[in-house]
Amino acid sequence: MLIVTRRKFLKLTTGSLATGLATQLISFEDIANAAISRPLAANTPILVVVTLYGGNDGLNTVIPFTDSTYFSARPGMTYPISQMLPIDAELALNPAMSGMKTLWDQNKVAIVRGVGYPNPDRSHFSSMAKWQTGSPNNNLSTGWIGRWIDTQKEDPMLAISLGSVLPPLFAGAKRSGSALPIGGLVIPKGVTGAQLQKISTPSAKDSKLMAASATSMRNLFSVSTDVQPVLKAPAPLAPDLPTINGGNAGGDNNLAQQLDVVAKLIAADSPTKVWSVSLGGFDTHANEANAQAALLGVVSSSIYRFMSQLKSTTRSNDVTVLIYSEFGRRVAANGSDGTDHGTSGPMFVIGNSVKGGFYGDQPSLKSLINGDLAVTTDFRDVYASLLEGVLKSPVEPSLGNWSGRVNFLKTA
């Protein structure tokens, strides 16, 4: 039988431990206590960042449905025009995005078109790194939110990412955001569980590294204990969602679950100004039409449900949601009714403080660059606008002297 000792644990988990030491795991109890002792002041803006991993196809998200080039480039992976959701005379949302269409009709959705960075390289890893660090030209080890965290008073509740791995987005040079695992957290039981519980007990003989390991392990047990009751508790009432058997008919999925938790903690006045949630699966190289519609349906319904839940709180005017992916897809379909890695795509900014409408130029299907859409808006324009308009902070610490802005927020 394998006997787990503190030293063996350290030896066996060297790689993950490095992340664990850099990532501050927090529990619901920590957040609840902070919400009671020092709640977020009324009217404080909150940013919720939604990352779509895999490279979402922007052309099948915001569809140029009057352009014949779109249909000829993608035989077998478009949708009937009758099912699309027009939002102006030339563009329509994916048929699965009815919730987003409702928010658009309420002037709560800004769509920034053609967003990307100079000289896109179509690599998941390096492209997401550029988006999350906010630096297309330099290999930085800090994220654009992480550098903002560096400018704030030290507070583990300031920026929280749902998931067991902290995204580079939240990594700062002096400090980083915190991670709150809610899914896939499996704590060992039986003999192994008992051994792990034992080695997580603090000891005066611990080295600094061992003490950090023990703290990390205790946090995992604490999260495991605290998460389930909170997840089982009802989310804030969504007054405009239909109900089935007394419950909200918003469906359930991992993104919805993450946003349910965020809605609960926002309603509880958690002193958190930035939240991060995510959804993967957008690397649609085959059979894209159905797969992407399913994913976009999840995004659309989850965001609509989240915004509806906020209506029953005092924070409905405080929250701004940002949705992005690391790149769009190639314009032409591949041989598998899918698309390969491309360049620019739309970003969504959502909230009561948002001026709904289009921003940035729609990339032309007749002026492609090596078969890809042109980048018409630099993502740093969007980040700079959110830093100033939502986080009420100067841009320079996060983005240097970047001068671009997108005017999608209402002025007070």
Image: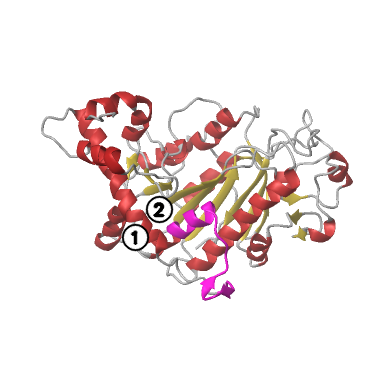
**Disc 2, SS:** loop
Examine the image and state in which quarter residue 404 appears.
top right
Amino acid type assigned to the residue bearing label 1 in the image = Leu
The relative height of residue 118 versus residue 229 in the rendered view (above or below) is above
**In which quadrant will I find the N terminus?**
top left
Q: Residues within 10 Å of mark 1 (few under 14, many from 20)?
A: many
What range of the chain is rendered magenta?
240-262
> Where residue 4 sits in the image (x, y, percent)?
26, 30
Is residue 27 in view from this perspective? no
- Return the disc, 2 or 1, that comes first in the chain's sequence: 1
Return the residue at label 2: 273
In the image, what residue occupies the spot 68% across and 35% down?
343
Q: Give the left or right position of residue 322, taking residue 122 as reference.
A: left
Amino acid type assigned to the residue bearing label 2 in the image = Lys
In the image, what residue occupies the spot 56% across and 74% down?
243
Judging depth in this view, the residue of 296 and 275 nearest the camera is 296
Q: Residues within 10 Å of mark 2 (few under 14, many from 20)?
A: many
The relative height of residue 135 versus residue 227 in the rendered view (above or below) is above
Q: Give the left or right position of residue 393, taking residue 206 as reference.
A: right
Judging depth in this view, the residue of 182 and 133 nearest the camera is 182
Q: Is residue 16 magenta?
A: no
Q: Are marks 2 and 1 in contact (CB under 8 Å)?
A: yes
Return the residue at label 1: 40
